[in-house]
Image: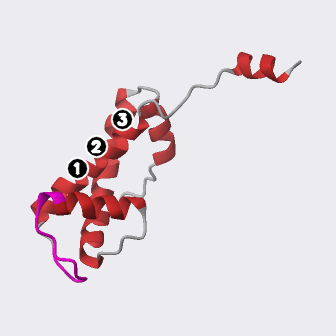
Amino acid sequence: MDTKEVDFERLAFRAGRGDREAGATLRRELEPQLVRMVRRTLRTQHETTPLARRVLAEARRMAVVPRREGWIAPEPLIGQVARRMCEWIMAGLVGAVNPRRWLHDTVVGVH
């Protein structure tokens, strides 16, 4: 069994700074996790997090989603929603990471 741990925070930081390889790795590692999250969210209908609310809203834009717990969503819908959530997360990384300006921070702090 593969016991590697993925450092999502580090990958997100690097991807946000424009590292294409980190972005590709993040997407490849994140999307399968999102598939599980989407499947569970559609089954439970719990809107307890911003991601869950977005998942349900996106799924409802794409298909008729019953507002009841226990619904088993079709796999194609789960995959589409997971891809959209991954795109949303990846788009949020662009420009979200501000490089430190060490010299500026030091000079501004001294008066």
Residue 56 location (% of width, % of height):
26, 64
In the image, taking residue 33 as reference, residue 16 lies left or right, namely right
Q: Quadrant of residue 1?
A: bottom left
Amino acid at dot 1: Arg
| Contact? badges 1 and 2 (CB < 8 Å) | yes
| Residue under pointer 1 | 83
Amino acid at dot 3: Gly
Q: Quadrant of residue 70?
A: bottom left
| Residue under pointer 2 | 87
Whether residue 77 appears in this view of the structure is yes
Start and end of the magenta stretch? 61-72
Observer-nearest residue: 68 or 79?
A: 68
Is disc 2 surrounded by few (<14), some (14 to 19) or many (20+) residues within 10 Å?
few
Is disc 1 surrounded by few (<14), some (14 to 19) or many (20+) residues within 10 Å?
some
- The first of marks 3 and 1 along the sequence is 3
Quick check: 49 above or below 17? below
| Residue under pointer 3 | 23
* Residue 70 included in the magenta stretch of the image: yes
